[in-house]
Image (tube, rainbow, N blue to C red):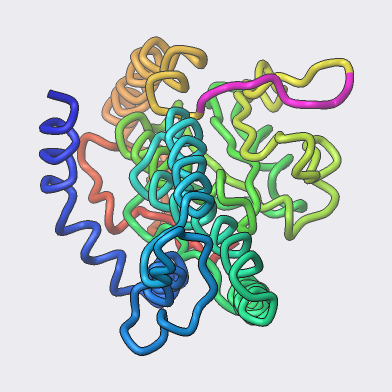
Amino acid sequence: MALITGLCTFLYHLPQIYKWLLKPYYVTSFFMTVAFLVVRKAPGLCEHLATQRDDGNSCDFDWREVEILMFLSAIVMMKNRRAITLEQHIGNLFLFSKVANVILFFRLDIRLGILYLSLCVAFVMTCKPPLYMGPEYIKYFSDKTIDEELQRDSRVTWIVEFYANWSSDCQSFAPVFADLSLKYNCAGLRFGKVDIGRYGEVSQTVSTSPLAKQLPTVALFQGGREIMRRPMVDNKGRAVSWTFNDENIIREFNLNEIFQKSKKLNKGRDLKEEEDPNDPQPEEGSDELHPETDNPEQLTESKKDK
């Protein structure tokens, strides 16, 4: 049953997977993932490789290579238990496959190991994972605009994500946060992001160390003051384990309740404008959003306009 469910899920996401594999990052990762399999099975090449098989067949895996591959499968399955997006599942597979390939190539021939490790280093330095560029209702802050924007209107609640482009967890969470902004954004509930890898002053509130595991961090602000954040931080400055998915964000930050109150704020503002027609109307390009009438594509903040 589990196999059938997995197969159905794969077929459902097949068009999306196909689209991803056309990107240079995923194309290169795929070939680097299957590199050892290709070398071990390639006719004309595998006959010259070393092997520990009793029958001397160097074109098949020996018992040690099978153990390494089985251990790789177990690690990927454990890591993917906490994965929340398909991109994160595939990313974990690519990452640990490369690590296993390094071990396998060094065990096979130290020259092949050095060559493959050099390719991995070059890949990390030159090829970055593609950033999420889909629709969203998110305002991007800088270190100079975040405080002013959060304190501009005490009635507005802000959900702010602190992220870094180099963090794979932040990249995996990006489509989830964008989807939440499309569902819950309104005049009284806004979504924002700030790149702490780019703005050093803001990063003082969130540790950028991979060991601290504080990226991404999502914080709730009301009246310019931080009310809560996830993940929480213990006495040693390390983040308490927390899964970043839409269900946890909605439950922990009470988004449904805040959204209902924010819709009343929307109606109050609209009613005030109808009662007092002499009030100045919002200028064109105003920052105020109304999800009931606005077009998401037109109001999406530009990722380059920070």
> Residue at 55% of width from left, 30% of height from top?
158
Instruction: Judge whether 31 appears above or below 136 on screen.
Output: below
Residue 183 occupies quadrant: top left
> Residue at 23% of width from left, 50% of height from top?
295
Indicate left or right for 160 with 240 as reference.
left
Residue 280 in view in this figure: no
> Residue at 60% of width from left, 31% of height from top?
218
Q: Residue placed farthest to the right in the image? A: 236
* Magenta residue span: 236-243
Residue 61 in view in this figure: yes
Q: Position of residue 300 (x, y in %)?
A: 37, 54
Main structural element of the magenta stretch: helix, strand or loop?
loop
- Between 39 and 161, the one lying in front of the other is 39
Residue 39 occupies quadrant: bottom left
Indicate left or right for 112 with 3 as reference.
right
Magenta run includes residue 109? no
Q: Position of residue 146 (x, y in %)?
A: 69, 44
- Between 215 and 86, the one lying in front of the other is 86
Indicate left or right for 166 with 291 as reference.
right
- Between 118 and 294, the one lying in front of the other is 118
